[in-house]
Image (cartoon, helix red, strand yellow):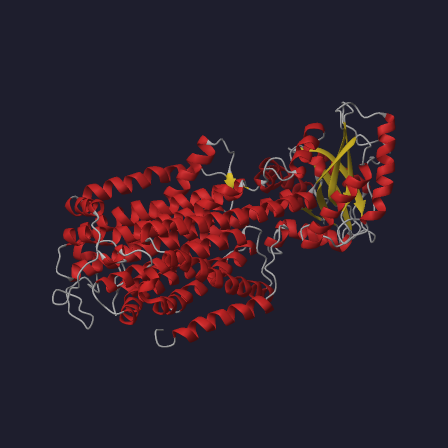
Amino acid sequence: MTRFRWFVIAGWILLAAVVVSTAPALESTQDNSEFLPDHYESIQALQLQEEKFSDAFSPGAILVIEREDGAALTAEDQAEVGTFAQELAPELGTDTFQPAVFFQDEQGKPNLSEDGTVLFAVIPLADGATGYDTQAFDDGRDLREEIDELTGDSGLEVRATGAVLQGLDSQESSEQTLVIVGIATIVLIVGLLALIFRSVLICLLPIVTVGIVSMIATGAIAWANDLFDLKADASVEQILVVVLYGVGTDYILFFLFRHRERLRQGAEVKDAVVHSLDRAGEAIASAGGAVIVAFMALVLSSLSIFRAIGPALAIAVFVTLLAALTLVPAVVSLLGRALFWPSKSWQKEPKHGTFVKLGRAVGRRPGVVALVSGGVMTVLALFALSFNPSFDFNSSLPEGVESTEAMETFQANFSAGAAEPVPVLVDAEGADVTEAQLGEFKAALEGARGVDAVAGPVPSEDGSAFQYYLTLADDPVSDAAQDNVAGPIRDTAHDAAPEGTEAYVGGTPGIFADMSSAMARDYKVVFPVAAGVIMLILALLLRSLVAPWFLMAAVGLGFAATLGLTVIAFQNIGGEPGLIFMLPIYIYLFVTALGTDYNILMIARLREEAREGRDPHDAASQAVTHAGPTIGAAGIILAGTFASLMLGGNTLIVSMGFALAVGILIVAFVMSMFFTPSLTSLLGHVAWWPGHGDEARDDAHGHGPAGGEPRDGDEVPAGVDLVK
């Protein structure tokens, strides 16, 4: 890297330019049906509806109409609404909306609330429109502009909500969150690096490096999504920001700490770069490999949301890993000692009394330390048992947006389920179904728990299928609606379906119910596979069959403690009815993968100390003393980048940011710094069976009693002296 540094730097810049100019845009979807395989009931209902009822009515937008003074709507006001609907309809012949505005029911009566203060109108989706794509959101913006122009000074307030408008507000909220997260992440990284290194150029190094990496990774992810038809959800870009900057800064820290240590020993810049890459490179590569494997395990998920985000994050980490092993050394070699400007304190070896004391405590009483640190995580882990998964995406919308306020008004004045009737499809292909049977089926549906009203049946053109619409007692996107559809409503539909027919319950609550089933399956598949492959990496890396077991057990305990603490913060203290259903997957992946990183750093330092002839207790003491500051600095920066997600004002992202931030702090400061070294100390020589990599030896790098190098109390990143 030192010899070809200019070529390496130029190559990365050129690659970034090519990717930016040729790669497609990274797009996301909010259509939850796109996340499920075809064998789920909600998707089968959707397919039957598209096949047999191509002209089926599906609400795309709901207009909530009130007087600006809050009084009851007069006959003149209702006539004004009729005129408004006639003028608006011709403007709605778009890819998303049909040119129609319905403000009356089937009997011609206005959709008026009991007190007469609120009227609602429905705008249907156009044929073939999902209402969740980019064009739909553009049409939603145009709809609001048309409404503003047409209402003018009429004295009426018209607010738009429904699937399209809620998706639009969610997207705009995500875009605002992305800006806030990006700014907060950069400010945090610059601030922490300034405190650690007091160098202008080092503060800029991760910003510039990750900026280049981000352009390449985003383009590569977009290509992969197009090539494999992957559907990423709207949160992927926000997570990418923190992953790229958080993980990228960690890897840069591992390299810079070792580089600064070597320079303090009197080496020339080029020699220090080569030495640091040799020592830190394997640690960075193994840590990155564990992260990539954990993310790639998501391709086994039955939900396309995870099958898309898994490879996306794996690609991002892979590109970051390559940059850490090539671009960063090339830039450091080019800048030389000017890298640390204007600070001169880097030339002196600082003393860290705190980590010396912590190291002594671990070495002196490893049993107590293991019991206390493990006990704390166990107590927190118990609260994970009360985790309640929620599929209510709309609750994550920030307060004050138009679609949220309009929907609250709608639900306060009309049946909550009227916003989105749930379709029930009866496939009667080859069956002779009578009107009496269809009536009995309708009556059964009306008696199901959670159903307010049933409309239909509507026969298909060929008479081989029938469609009903359920008005639920609860908001269709609520957890209560999902539970009712998954349980009594589907049970009733299946049992009451006329002989020879098959009934399917679809709609948004049906999709959420099926996603819940898919998640339960994924927990049983993705978690064990990711853990197994990471254990294999650890076994190969450490030449041990014992260490991977207790390391992964420690990481698993860290995962459960993280979920438990999040439950305490949001469900027990915050009063939230539940947490977003995908949270355990994200915690597992980030805490498992990144927690394994820190464990690798600590366990390798423990082995290095043991190789120098120290007994297990003394090795644990020295490992915490010398590796602790590195893990602490990396953990604080990475936790801080995840914590920046909490600034977005979106409940989903806030809970995710909190969980990932506290998870990193737990694995860095409780698990890696105390639990792992104390447990390793207690196991002693057995921890390295059968390879016994802790045995003292001499090698070309001067390891072992005969060739131990001078120590740097705060910079030696654990894990850099791995088996060669």
Say whether residue 573 is left or right of residue 678: right
Q: Position of residue 210 (x, y in %)?
A: 45, 60
Which residue is rendered at x = 46% and y = 35% of the image?
Answer: 570
Mark yes or no: residue 447 visible: no
Quadrant location of residue 538? bottom left
Q: Position of residue 614 (x, y in %)?
A: 13, 57
Quadrant location of residue 7? bottom left
Q: Position of residue 405 (x, y in %)?
A: 66, 34
Say whether residue 174 is left or right of residue 75: left
Locate the C terminus by quadrant: bottom left
Q: Position of residue 74 (x, y in %)?
A: 84, 25
Locate the N terminus by quadrant: bottom left
Label tally: 0
Mark yes or no: residue 451 visible: yes
Say whether residue 388 is left or right of residue 23: left
Farthest residue toward the front? 342
Question: In the image, is residue 138 above or below residue 697?
Answer: above
Which residue is rendered at x = 73% and y = 53% of the image?
Answer: 129
Q: Between residues 434 and 689, which one lies in front from this camera angle?
A: 689
Q: Between residues 113 and 235, which one lies in front from this camera angle?
A: 235
Which residue is rendered at x = 72% and y = 47% of the image?
Answer: 140
